[in-house]
Amino acid sequence: MESKFLEARTEEIKYHEKFYAEHDLFAPGTWLAKPVKAIMDSLELLDPNDLRVLDLGSGVGRNAVPIAQAIKMYNGRVTAVDLIPSAITILRENAIKYNVYDNLVPIIKDVEDYQIEPQFYDYIIACSSLEHVATEDVLRSVFTRMIEGTKPDGINAILMNTEVEEVDCETGEVSEGLIELNLKTDEALELMKDCYTGWEIVVERFMPQSINEIKYGKSIEFRGNWLTFIVRRSS
């Protein structure tokens, strides 16, 4: 189990380092082209004044930079956490480029280990990051820290890939996706609902998605269900 996790983690880091080096933030035709609509829509449900946002698995700023831009004039601040040092380096450059350097705080840290200050954040997002933790127990622990770190009326937005498989574009061979935590969609939803008992469900949905990638030195079709679970804490 540990060797499979390490193999998946190594490949994910290699893929993202290469992708970030070759594609600018908001580059058309890539998954960096724009922020996730559900995340930006949920931001509008919150009072923008002095908003505190935590982006777990921020990458180079796909969501963190647009959020920082949206709340800058209201004294808002985004804390952006990512495991990959090169991604955080590029994020700092993007913060300067898009004039949000003073209200965006980049941090190099594994989401699994990041300690969240209790009841500090109005909005915590984890977009395509929690499928990269080691186990379901670790995932539950991250949810617990997210919950404890959220203010009354605050929102958590969790978006993750489930039921991942990979198709070799040359041979057509289908295999289980090499990803750290490959949950069934219903299992992931059950875990989320259990952890977030008593929270208002703002969005609950999943849809099939397919992305062409270069991994392992060959062309791969990444397939799975894109699960969106957005919830709001009661006041």
Image (cartoon, rainbow, N blue to C red):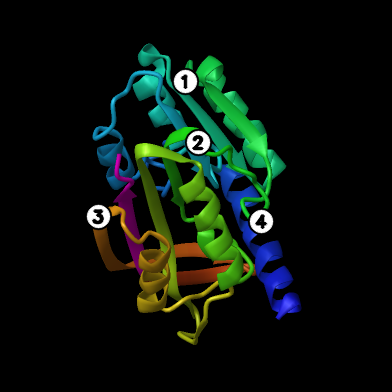
The residue mark sitting in front, 2 or 3, is: 3
Q: Which residue is mark 4?
A: 13
Residue 171 percent coordinates (x, y):
50, 85
Q: Residues within 10 Å of mark 4 (few under 14, many from 20)?
A: some
Q: What kind of residue is marked 2?
A: Gly
- Magenta segment: 225-235
Q: Are marks 1 and 2 in contact (CB under 8 Å)?
A: yes
Can see residue 180?
A: no
Q: Quadrant of residue 1?
A: bottom right
Q: Nearer the viewer, residue 156 or 3?
A: 156
Would residue 228 be counted in the magenta stretch? yes
Q: What kind of residue is marked 4?
A: Ile
Q: Which residue is mark 2?
A: 61
Q: Which residue is mark 1?
A: 98
Give the secondary structure at mark 1: loop
Q: Residues within 10 Å of mark 1 (few under 14, many from 20)?
A: few
Q: Nearer the viewer, residue 214 or 26?
A: 26
Q: CA distance from mark 2 to mark 3?
A: 23 Å
